[in-house]
Image: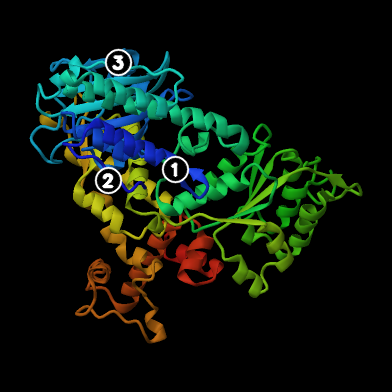
Amino acid sequence: MPETPLPRNDTPLAALNAWLAAWLTEEEGGKRRALPWTRLLAAIMQRLPGEAATLMRYLPERDELLPLATHGLPAEVRGRRFALSEHPRLKAIAEHTGVYRFAVDSDLPDPFDGLLGEVHGPDLLVHDCAGIALREGDRLLGVMTFDALTPGVLAPLEALEVRQVGDAELADVLAQEHQEHQEHQEHQEHQELHDLLTLPTCCLALASRLERRAAPLTGMAALAPGMTPQAQRTCPQRGPAMARLEAQLEAVADTDMTVLVTGETGVGKEGVVQRLHDASRRASRPLVRINCAALAPELVESALFGHRRGAFSGASHDHRGHFVMADGGTLLLDEIGELPLALQPKLLRVLQEGEMQPLGSDRVVRVDVRVIAATNRDLEAEVAAGHFREDLYHRLSVYPLRVPPLRERGRADLLALAGTFLEHNRTRLGLGNLRLTPAAERLLCDYPWPGNVRELEHCLSRAALHARLAQGAHPTRLRADGRQLVVITPELLGLEASAEVAHEQAGGIALHAAQEGHGKIQAGRANPAQRHVLQDIDEALGLRDATEAFQREHISRVWLASDRNWAEAARRLKVDRGNLYRQARRLGIV
């Protein structure tokens, strides 16, 4: 970051230009640094009216706007996408030339209704709204929006005109603006506002050109900074942990290296695999998936390598097998740690020689397949325990990729992901808007998320539904189009009730079996999460019934946190999978 601090209100525009130019010329790790969208918007809002603002990039492939920076809005807004077809005000701004300010009595709903001001304030509607389309010639690059709860606040914006940039580089535009600034001292304030609003257009144009130049070299799609079409459907990750993963993805995506994707349940390993395929030379060929844990052991060999008619009882026709299906493309071997030990040498042969022999055939079949394996197991530990072949492990982990768990990604990434899921549920439930209270945000950030991204998604889906039912249709919480503005409070998240499971998985609480003689929970010294478990058990129950009630509750919660995967639940509970399933059936869980 440049040594020069971000300009203050009394700093001339030239200082902002110099600061931005210094940022752009610096390099980090041999690459030009990403544009500082948040700090740029903050500098702009020091000179402009309004309580909230956004700087959003246009994604033409999906006709959507992607927030690059927000001001005065909840942090989770940066994880949302705004389809122009669903947001008439944004569509009107995008189609207009220059500043577009809406009438106070406009019947078009504002996309940020319910997101400004106090979460329980008497009026959550935006009463003054304006926006600017940012263009390079005739091409829409993005928009800036400005909102206020008080009518008339944004009136000064109507007098401004924003330059539409051509093919000049940003440095040339900055120099030109500096010269104009010197020539028009008599209109200094108006000129500075004009030039401030030109800077985002210049930055977007520069980012677009740099990405188009880099795309043929990296194989990564030039849509939003460092994003592929798959990432575009999810949340932009900005924290250090995901930035490291992003760099690794760019390094290995366009190679044919075998990749081993590891990570806990629910972190998004399949999304990473999709990105690897989309950015590879094989993107036009199929991506074939097979879950090794979902197949009976006697069917895995046939599923992978194929069989000929009559090869075994029930083989009434030929089957190509997944390797042949993926020929020329990519094969995902999900849950590779579940692959039976007896079949691992045959998989090793395919990886080494590129050839295999279907069941019942005496002919060798050659395949050209890039293999990506995924697992939530520690394969090194499996090798040490004799459950996984060491030579196969090394062949699979030519390039290992670890997807960090949600608790390592930081507050900004978590809330951006939350915004993605909130926007999805807003659309699904037909709501005007959906937001979290500050206390709910804090609870999301403090919770350890043993089920990771998948658990966060399911948690917010349930909370959105419960919030809609609990709050009903309040007159002061209806948007201009009559849709409900809904707020999610901490109790609707349902996280406190399952805190003991989450903390156990994160290493915070260890609930050992009472029959082992240690780890007993005494009600007088139990923490709040432990007391909640005890309070759920009827004191009138006998010891046996109370023990079964506790087992039923605990197994159910761990199973749900494991996305209903018995193998994963058994690993978390440190018991045999078969025994756990039989116990669950006895307790009436399944």
The tag earlier along the polypeptide, 1 or 2, is 2
* Front position among marks 1 and 3: 1
- CA neighbours of label 2 inside 10 A, class few (<14), some (14 to 19), many (20+): few
Q: Which mark is residue 92?
A: 3
Circle 1 residue: 33
Depth check, front residue: 273 or 266? 273
Quadrant of residue 186 within the rendered picture: top left
| Residue at the image position 34 percent from the left and 67 percent from the top | 503
SS assignment at label 3: helix
Q: Say which element carries label 1.
A: loop
Side (left or right) of 14 relative to 375? left
Q: Is residue 433 above or below residue 105?
A: below
Give me the C-alpha separation between circle 2 and circle 3. 36 Å
Quadrant of residue 276 in the image? Answer: top right
Q: Label 3 amino acid?
A: Ala
Farthest bottom residue? 517
Label 2 residue SS? loop
Separation of marks 1 and 3 at Cα, in angstroms: 33 Å
Q: Position of residue 528 (x, y in %)?
A: 22, 69
Real-space Cα separation, disc 1 to disc 2, in angstroms: 17 Å
Dot 3, how many residues are within 10 Å of its Cα: few (below 14), some (14-19), or many (20+)? Answer: some
Q: Which residue is mark 2?
A: 5
Mark yes or no: residue 437 visible. Answer: yes
Q: Residue at x 39, y 52 (%)?
A: 455
